[in-house]
Amino acid sequence: MSNTAMTVSEAIQARRATKHFDSEHVMSDEEFETLISHATLSPTAFNIQHWRFVRVNDRSLRQQIAGAAWDQPQVTDASLLLVLTMDVQAWQKEPERYWQDAPQEARDFILPALEAYYLDKPQVQRDEAMRSGGLVAMNMMLMAQQMGYDSCPMDGFDFDKVAELIKLPEDHLICMMLAIGKQSKDSWPRLSRLPQSEIVIENHY
Ligand SMILES: Cc1cc2nc3c(=O)[nH]c(=O)nc-3n(C[C@H](O)[C@H](O)[C@H](O)COP(=O)(O)O)c2cc1C
């Protein structure tokens, strides 16, 4: 880790959606492990952990994905390209394992509640998976920042085509792609954010 002193505030302020990466830089397996192990401490409803990270190392697959992403250079040049996929049905795949460390009385209460929450509710299942994806992606980008990496969240690609290329299972969805690497060219100045007077609503609309 190259920048252990970075605070959360500093990581948030330093992160930019990076377009240009050093294509020569290699991320070590140890760094990858650090990134994943921190990102997956993100919260998920019922601890379901819908995320399934497709790490694309294969150069020709990267080229094909770039072709489905308007040839955005991040896809081929980032040290790490993840297709962040979500198992929408994870809620019903051996859910006991999500709660195996909890006391028995908690398990007795939570597991039926979990089933009742998702059963026959495809919109809820999907929304929940996407919520998990947004949270894990953000933590991954902030952790990357602390480790001296830059990142780009991406949805500028043909989802159906990328799903086909990575052989996405029927009951999974793609949330976004994440490109992580060393920035090779300065970003343009950050775009301004909307004023708080527009985005903060006190009590109700
Ligand atoms: C879900 C999502 C998808 C995005 N897709 C792309 C993309 O395909 N290509 C790209 O260059 N930037 C992409 N971005 C980056 C945004 O354009 C960028 O975050 C925004 O302009 C604000 O810039 P900043 O992140 O540097 O502050 C995406 C961001 C998000 C959150």
Image (tube, rainbow, N blue to C red):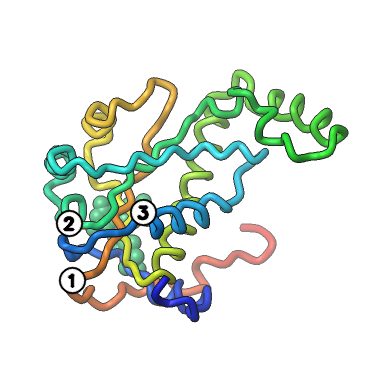
- The residue to which callout 1 is attached is 184
Residue toward you, 80 or 119 = 80
Q: Residues within 10 Å of mark 3 (few under 14, many from 20)?
A: few
Of labels 2 and 3, earlier in sequence is 3
Q: CA distance from mark 1 to mark 3?
A: 22 Å
Q: Residue at x 24, y 26 (%)?
A: 164
Q: Nearer the viewer, mark 2 or mark 3?
A: 3
Residue 41 position, x and y percent, is 58, 53
Query: Is residue 8 toward the left or the right of residue 161 in the image?
Result: right
Q: Amino acid at mark 2?
A: Asp
Looking at the rendered structure, the kind of residue marked 1 is Ser
Helix, strand or loop under label 2: helix
In primary-sequence order, the first of circles 1 and 3 is: 3
> Residue at horizontal 35%, vertical 45%?
176
Give the quadrant of ligand 1: bottom left
Left-right relation of 52 to 188: right
Horizontal and vertical percent for residue 85? 40, 37
Residue depicted at 13% across the width and 46% down the height? 70
Q: Residues within 10 Å of mark 2 (few under 14, many from 20)?
A: many
Q: Which residue is mark 3?
A: 29
Measured as percent of width and height from the top left, residue 66 is found at 15, 44
Q: Residue 193, can we see it?
A: yes
Residues at discs 1 and 2 in contact (Cβ within 8 Å): yes
Residue at the spot x=64%, y=41% of the render?
47
Q: Mark 3 belongs to which amino acid?
A: Asp
Label 1 residue SS: loop
